[in-house]
């Protein structure tokens, strides 16, 4: 089992800004360019959102509109699915909370799986079951492996069988990468 996040998000920004959108550059860094809920990198999707953890559609939380501690860097899929949903029992877990990983995990294939009732609620309301979350995880793994393979390729003899196998595999990896771009649009 793996953590949902490759690197744990943290909130380091101590500024108090007038508009929540002004935090974009800070939150992007603090969340390591990845969605707080599903952990997907923004490398595969153009414009990520800034989610209000406690939603703005709920009158109880309007005072938190520009509160950095209430903001989550989020992919559009998690943010739009979550919308203004807020549960008072078995509530959602803040991605920066130390216990996030005890509610949701990734299995060996990169699929996000809920562990607790809170995790199940997030899984359902943020649609963490979407295939894209597994696919992005696998593609990122392929990209890391491809870098290794390209280094290895440089050590192989010209016209050798090993080089042919390596080249065929690199070509296949590039094809998978191009499909991903289509899928993400
Ligand atoms: Zn997401």
Image: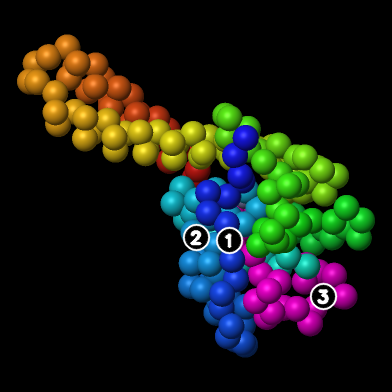
Q: Using the image, determine if residue 172 lies above or below residue 97.
A: above
Quarter that holds the N terminus: top right
How far across and down, in percent of the image, does residue 158 sit? 7, 20
- The answer to whether the residue labelled 2 contacts the one labelled 1, judged by CB atoms less than 8 Å apart, is yes
Label 2: which residue? 32
- Which numbered dot is residue 150? none
Structural distance between the alpha carbons of marks 2 and 1 = 7 Å
Estimate how packed mark 1 is, as few (under 14), some (14 to 19) or many (20 or more) residues with alpha carbons within 10 Å: many
Q: Nearer the viewer, mark 1 or mark 3?
A: 1
* First-in-chain label (3 vs 2): 2
Residue visible at 53% across and 54% down? 7
Q: In the orientation shown, which residue stands out farthest toward the right?
A: 89
Estimate how packed mark 2 is, as few (under 14), some (14 to 19) or many (20 or more) residues with alpha carbons within 10 Å: many
- Considering depth in this image, is 138 or 103 the residue closer to the camera? 103
Q: Is residue 45 visible?
A: no
- Considering depth in this image, is 10 or 120 the residue closer to the camera? 10
Residue visible at 57% across and 57% down? 8
* First-in-chain label (2 vs 1): 1
Label 3: which residue? 61
Please tell me whether residue 164 belongs to the stretch shown in magenta: no
Please tell me whether residue 60 belongs to the stretch shown in magenta: yes
Estimate how packed mark 3 is, as few (under 14), some (14 to 19) or many (20 or more) residues with alpha carbons within 10 Å: some
Label 1: which residue? 9
């Amino acid at each position: 089992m793996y953590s949902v996040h490759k690197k744990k998000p943290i909130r380091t920004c101590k500024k108090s800004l007038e508009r929540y959108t002004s935090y974009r550059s800070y939150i992007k860094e603090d969340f390591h360019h990845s969605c707080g809920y599903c952990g997907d990198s923004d490398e595969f999707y153009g414009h990520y959102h800034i989610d209000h953890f406690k939603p703005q559609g709920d009158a109880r939380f309007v005072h938190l509109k520009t509160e950095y501690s209430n903001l989550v860097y989020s992919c559009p899929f998690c943010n739009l699915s979550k919308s203004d949903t807020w549960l008072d029992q078995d509530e959602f877990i803040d991605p920066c909370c130390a216990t996030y990983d005890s509610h949701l995990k990734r299995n060996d294939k990169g699929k996000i799986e809920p562990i607790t009732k809170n995790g199940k609620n997030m899984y359902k309301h943020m649609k963490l079951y979407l295939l894209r979350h597994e696919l992005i995880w696998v593609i990122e793994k392929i990209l890391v492996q491809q870098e290794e393979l390209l280094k290895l390729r440089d050590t192989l003899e010209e016209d050798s069988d090993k080089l042919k196998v390596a080249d065929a595999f690199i070509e296949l990896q590039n094809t998978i990468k191009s499909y991903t771009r289509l899928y993400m649009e």
